[in-house]
Image: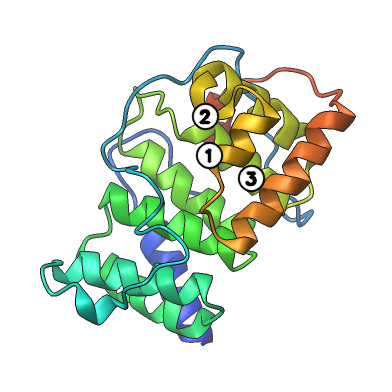
Amino acid sequence: MKTIVRALTVLLSLATAAPLLAQTSPPASGRLPIVLPDGKPYADPDLSARGLPEAPYPGTRAPIQWPQLSPVRRLSYEGWWAAVTNRPSAARLNFARALRITPNDRRLLWSYGWAQLNMGEPAMAMAAFQRNLALRPNDRPRWLPMALALTYTAAGERDAAAAWYRTAALSDPMQWGSDHQVLRTTLEWTPQERALVSQLLEYAAQGDRAEPASFARLAER
């Protein structure tokens, strides 16, 4: 198990040409780096983030019933499915294999980030999302605000979660413009994800007192 975790950490921390590199662990304080939105929408479409990470939940087809998938897609699907069905060892193994083959596959990194959220690992989810963003440093992908809102929710960072939730509503009001729309959008998400959504809505209702900051500050950490 420790070997697999170390392998995933190394794969996520491989250098890229982009200025923003993935962080693979929280700072010494044990908290995630707190980076808040800049007040502008994230409106760029991103084909690497289609629908749910790999398939609607609850899925009715096991991975073996998808023979047309490429090896990396199959490993990604099996890893995500293992994560959402409470089999973390299998999830880590499949993602480690996939990342060895294509460490810069943005759809794989996106699925891996959501799998980590389902397994209660917000630091690793943040690392995957950061590495994904590093591969397209000039983009402002529409999926990012809600992904970070839920990542900070999983880490218990109320103010950061609420700030990114507001940015998600600004960026994609059709999906995140109101609590009702959020609940409708996430109707078929996994139980773990829906639990995070419920907690996020509570955080948002409480309000936050955080000061704005730029996402670019991640590069300084």
Looking at the image, which residue is at 41% across and 50% down? 52
Q: CA distance from mark 3 to mark 1?
A: 14 Å
| In this view, 27 is above or below 50 | below
Q: Residues within 10 Å of mark 1 (few under 14, many from 20)?
A: few
Position in image of residue 22 (x %, y %): 46, 48
- The residue wearing badge 3 is 150
Name the residue carrying label 2.
Answer: 175
Q: Do the numbered discs 2 and 3 sit on residues whose CB atoms are within 8 Å?
A: no
Q: Are marks 3 and 1 in contact (CB under 8 Å)?
A: no
Q: Residue 185's mark?
A: 1
Residue found at x 30% / y 47% = 106
Please tell me whether residue 49 is drawn above or below residue 74 in the rendered image: above
Q: Secondary structure at mark 3?
A: helix
The mark that comes first in sequence, 2 or 3, is: 3
Identify residue type, mark 2. Gln
Q: Are marks 2 and 1 in contact (CB under 8 Å)?
A: yes
Q: Quadrant of residue 180?
A: top right
Q: Quadrant of the C terminus?
A: top right
Residue at the spot x=78%, y=19% of the render?
Answer: 211
Q: Amino acid at mark 3?
A: Leu
Residue 127 lies left or right of residue 70; in this view the side is right
